[in-house]
């Protein structure tokens, strides 16, 4: 029997990561770019402006479905979209709804990672954001520490390419 090779993925997903608040965006900026390989981080201007959350569809030209906004285009190209929130009081619920609508329209899986050490959202704004995220996302993961966020994202992507599983007997 050939030895098991742990240095390749069994699948490779395209992940679009959407930071929802300034703390989440700052955390991403501090990460090693190599650790984010294969994960597309949405730019702040990808989210629709508050004045125009639902852009008018662009007429289709030729084959395929028309993509009506940069957000729709980015979601369309992803296998998985992940919302990332660290500071729920700073999350704009309208942006969450817009990403949720775009994911639903394309059948793209929408997950959310909320990094919250206490996981207590007593402030009304935080509670509202948590509710909006739960309603929009297919899956929500609550992490107590941001150091677990990157390994979780890498698992969604397909796992580390060169890491051996814990307890490996090589």
Image (tube, rainbow, N blue to C red):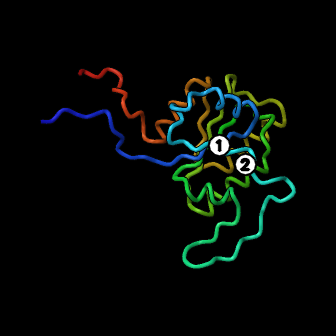
Q: Are marks 2 and 1 in contact (CB under 8 Å)?
A: yes
Instruction: Spot the residue most to the bottom.
Output: 62
Q: Is residue 106 above or below residue 164?
A: below
Instruction: Spot the residue most to the left.
Output: 1
Quadrant of the rendered image containing residue 122: top right
Which residue in the protein does label 1 denote?
83
- Which residue is located at x 65 percent, y 38 percent? 84
Please indicate whether residue 169 sits to the left or right of residue 101 in the image: left
Q: Residues within 10 Å of mark 2 (few under 14, many from 20)?
A: many
| Element under disc 1 | strand
Please indicate whether residue 10 sits to the left or right of residue 85 in the image: left
Please indicate whether residue 160 sits to the left or right of residue 113 in the image: left
On the image, the x and y values in percent for residue 118 come to 69, 23
Q: Is residue 144 above or below residue 65?
A: above
On the image, the x and y values in percent for residue 38 come to 50, 42
For residue 161, which numbered disc appears in the image?
Answer: none
Q: How many marks?
A: 2
First-in-chain label (2 vs 1): 1
Q: Residues within 10 Å of mark 1 (few under 14, many from 20)?
A: many
Instruction: Spot the residue most to the front.
Output: 33
Quadrant of the rendered image containing residue 165: top left
Which residue in the protein does label 2 denote?
96
On the image, the x and y values in percent for residue 135 come to 68, 49
Label 2 vs label 1: CA separation? Answer: 8 Å
Task: Point out the image quarter for the N terminus.
Answer: top left
- Which residue is located at x 46 percent, y 48 percent? 13
On the image, the x and y values in percent for residue 140 come to 60, 41
| Element under disc 2 | helix
- Which residue is located at x 61 percent, y 25 percent? 146
Q: Is residue 92 above or below residue 97?
A: above
Task: Point out the image quarter for the C terminus.
Answer: top left
């Amino acid at each position: 029997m050939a030895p098991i090779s742990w240095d390749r993925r069994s699948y490779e997903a395209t992940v679009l990561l959407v930071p929802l608040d300034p703390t989440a965006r700052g955390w991403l900026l501090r990460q090693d770019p190599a650790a984010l390989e294969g994960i597309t981080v949405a730019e702040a201007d990808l989210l629709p402006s508050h004045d125009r959350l639902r852009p008018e569809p662009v007429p289709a030209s030729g084959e395929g479905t028309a993509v009506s906004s940069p957000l729709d285009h980015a979601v369309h190209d992803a296998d998985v979209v992940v919302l990332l929130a660290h500071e729920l009081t700073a999350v704009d619920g309208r942006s969450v709804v817009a990403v949720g609508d775009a994911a639903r329209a394309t059948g793209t899986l929408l997950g959310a990672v909320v990094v919250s050490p206490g996981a207590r959202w007593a402030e009304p704004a935080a509670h509202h954001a948590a509710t909006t995220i739960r309603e929009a996302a297919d899956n929500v993961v609550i992490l107590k520490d941001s150091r677990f966020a990157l390994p979780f994202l890498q698992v969604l992507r397909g796992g580390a390419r060169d890491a051996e599983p814990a307890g490996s007997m090589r």
